Image (cartoon, helix red, strand yellow):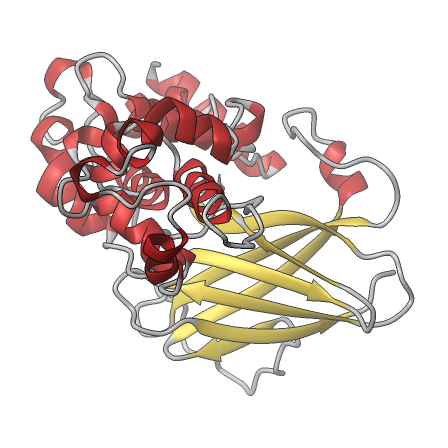
Amino acid sequence: MNSSRLLKWAALAASAGAMLSFSASAQHREQTGKEVVVAVCASCHAKGDNGAPRIGDEQAWAKRSSQGLTALTAHALQGIRKMPAHGGNAGLSDIEIQRAITYMVNQSGGHWVEPLAGSAQGTVRSSEQIVQSQCAKCHKEGLDGAPRIGDRAAWIPRMQKGLDTLVRAAVHGHGPMPARGGVADLSDLEIQGAIVYMFNYGVVTLPSPPPQAPVAVSPYRRVVDGTDIYLGIVGSEAMSADPRQRNVPGGKGYYHVNISLFDSATRLAITDAQVKVTVADPLSADTKTLDVISANDTVSYGGYFRMSGPNPYRITAQVQRPGAATVIKAEFEYKAR
C-alpha cells in the first residue's frame, strides 16, 4: 500500500469511526466439548493413560473439579505433568478447551454448564513481554514476510480483514509462523493483545493538558486504581448505518456498549486488557466479554446488549489488566431512550 492510499484509508477510518473487530464465531465454528474430547482428549482420558483422570472416574475428577474451571483451564493451556500445552493441539481455542473440560467433568459425575463464551487465564502476560520475548524474533526485522512491529503500512491491509482473522491465523499458524507463534501456552487473549501491540507500536498519544477550570464530573467516567474508564453507548441502528459493520443485531432495543481505558498517569490508551460488562435491570442481567475494537488510531472494547425496558440499567465493567492481581470494577447507570 503506497503512502497516498494509506492516508486515504486512515482518513476514511477516522471519519467513519471504522471498527475493525468482528466476531470470531463468524469466521470459525467452535467445536462442542464432546467433539474436542473425541478428537483430542480421549486418546489419554478414555483409558486413563499417562496418569490422566479417566472419563467416568468420579473420584478422580472430583479432586480436579473442586479446583474450578479457571484453574483447570490454566493447567490445560500451559500443560501439566505429561499433558502438553493445549492438549497437544495448539489450534484449539480457549473456549473449546473449557468446553472439553466441562464435558469430561459432567461425564464423571459433575453438573457444570458448558460455557458459551470463554474466560481468560487468571494472570495474563503483558503484550509487550510477549512481543519482545517471542514475536520480535521475526516481526522486528520482518523475517519471512512478517509485518514489522509498528509498520502500519504493512499491518493495515491485514487489519482490514478483521482482528479476529489475524488472531485465528496466529492460533493455527500461517506460512512460516508456527501455531501460537511457537509458544503453545499463549492464550487467545494474549495473542490478540500482542497483535494490537505490534499494530499500535510507536503511535504517540499526547497527555491531556491540565484543566484550566473546574470540570463537571461525567456520569460516564470512573477512575479506579489508576485507570480511567469511559462508557459509551450507541443504538444499533446507528451502527448498522455503516456498511462496514457486521453482526449488528436487528430489531429495537439493542445498543453497542463501548469501554475505553486510559492509564491515569500517562494518559496512554490501555490496549491489552480483558473487559467484561454486565448490563442489569431489576429482572435480568446479561454478561459478555467485550471485543477489542481498533478505530481512529486507538483501541477500545465493545459489544451489543439489549436494553428495551423503561427502568434504568446498571452497567458494571470488570477490567483485568495484564499482570494485575485484582479485577478493577466500575459501575454506571444508564436509562435507554
Q: Is residue 319 above or below residue 61?
A: below
Single out the residue that lies furthest toward the right: 310
Side of 316 relative to 310 (left or right): left
Image location of residue 328, percent across then percent down: 44, 73
For the point 16% across and 38% down, the residue is 50
Q: Quadrant of the N terminus?
A: top left
Side of 237 relative to 9 (left or right): right
Q: Give 275 or 231, whichever is nearer the viewer.
A: 275
For the point 51% across and 35% down, the residue is 21
Image location of residue 80, percent across then percent down: 18, 47
Q: Give 142 or 247, whichever is nearer the viewer.
A: 247
> Does residue 294 appear in this view?
yes
Side of 290 relative to 83 (left or right): right
- Residue 249: quarter of image: top right
Q: Give 323 or 158, whichever is nearer the viewer.
A: 323
- Residue 170: quarter of image: top left
Image location of residue 27, percent across then percent down: 52, 22
- Residue 97: quarter of image: top left
For the point 79% across and 69% down, the residue is 281
Numbered circles on residues, count? 0
